[in-house]
Image: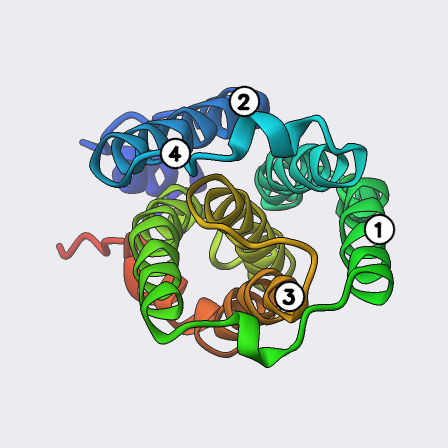
Amino acid sequence: MKTSDLIAALAKDLPPVRRLRPPLVRAACWLAVAFLVLALLAISQGIRQDLVSRLHDPAFALSMASSLLTGALAALAAFQVSLPDRSRLWLLLPLPALVVWLSNIGYQCLTQWIGPEGVTLGEAARCFATLVLTGLPLSLMMMVMLRYTVLLHPTAATLMGSLAVAAITATALALFHVMDASAMILIWNLGTAALFLGLGTVFGRGMLRRLAPQPSVAAN
């Protein structure tokens, strides 16, 4: 068979390839869903009563802003590094906001420590429910949106996606639950980040492979 005939036979009846949207657009879509989830939680649970007064505290406001910015930049980085022609330097995009976020948490815990007696069982259960209701849908959506890139850079994309979910989840916890600078900040904010980063590292590649569309082989 001639090469031209072979190419024509292989290309016959192939469906058109649908181009992925630009990373910025996909990140914006994911963040829009994240804000929708936060809005639904606000309607169902209600915003913490002292939120307005707490936002006047520079440390609390900085923590909220840096966690939200970390989530947005990590989401953009996840979609950027998932493409084969993008530099791995995109992994550094959320680093400044992440350093500010974690440093602020550590500073608050060192200067305004509240012991374990500040953590009640009821509040812990509500925080865990918020963690699941926020993190689960955002994680699943991130996996679905990254499914076409599974064979390219799965580890880097999964880690950035997990960081985005963790940061948005930490923002939700601060919005809906009374968590002053205490051990609770380390338990929930850092614990949330560690949880999703760990799950992304251990299960991310396998989950993406299951979600990825399988190439079809045409039989003669």
For residue 176, side relative to residue 16 (left or right): right
Could you tell me which secondary element the residue under label 1 belongs to? helix
Q: Residues within 10 Å of mark 4 (few under 14, many from 20)?
A: some
Q: CA distance from mark 2 to mark 4?
A: 34 Å
The foreground one among 145 and 28 is 28
Q: CA distance from mark 1 to mark 4?
A: 27 Å
For residue 17, side relative to residue 196 (left or right): left
Q: Nearer the viewer, mark 4 or mark 3?
A: 4
N-term-proximal mark, 2 vs 4? 2
**Against 20, is 114 above or below?**
below
Q: Which mark is residue 47?
A: 4
Please identify the quadrant where the C terminus is shown.
bottom left
Q: CA distance from mark 2 to mark 1?
A: 27 Å
Which amino acid type is marked by label 2? Pro
Which amino acid type is marked by label 4? Ile
Q: Residues within 10 Å of mark 2 (few under 14, many from 20)?
A: few
Q: CA distance from mark 2 to mark 3?
A: 31 Å
Could you tell me which secondary element the residue under label 2 belongs to? loop
For residue 188, side relative to residue 38 (left or right): right
N-term-proximal mark, 4 vs 3? 4
Q: Quadrant of residue 111 in the image?
A: bottom right
Query: Which residue bears the numbered disc 3?
Result: 190
Give me the residue at 65% from left, 37% from top: 64
Q: Quick check: marks 3 and 1 in contact, CB under 8 Å? A: no
Could you tell me which secondary element the residue under label 3 belongs to? helix
Which amino acid type is marked by label 1? Val
Give me the residue at 71% from left, 26% from top: 56
The foreground one among 44 and 54 is 54
Q: Quick check: marks 2 and 1 in contact, CB under 8 Å? A: no
Q: Which mark is residue 99?
A: 1
Q: Which mark is residue 22?
A: 2
**Against 179, is 44 above or below?**
above
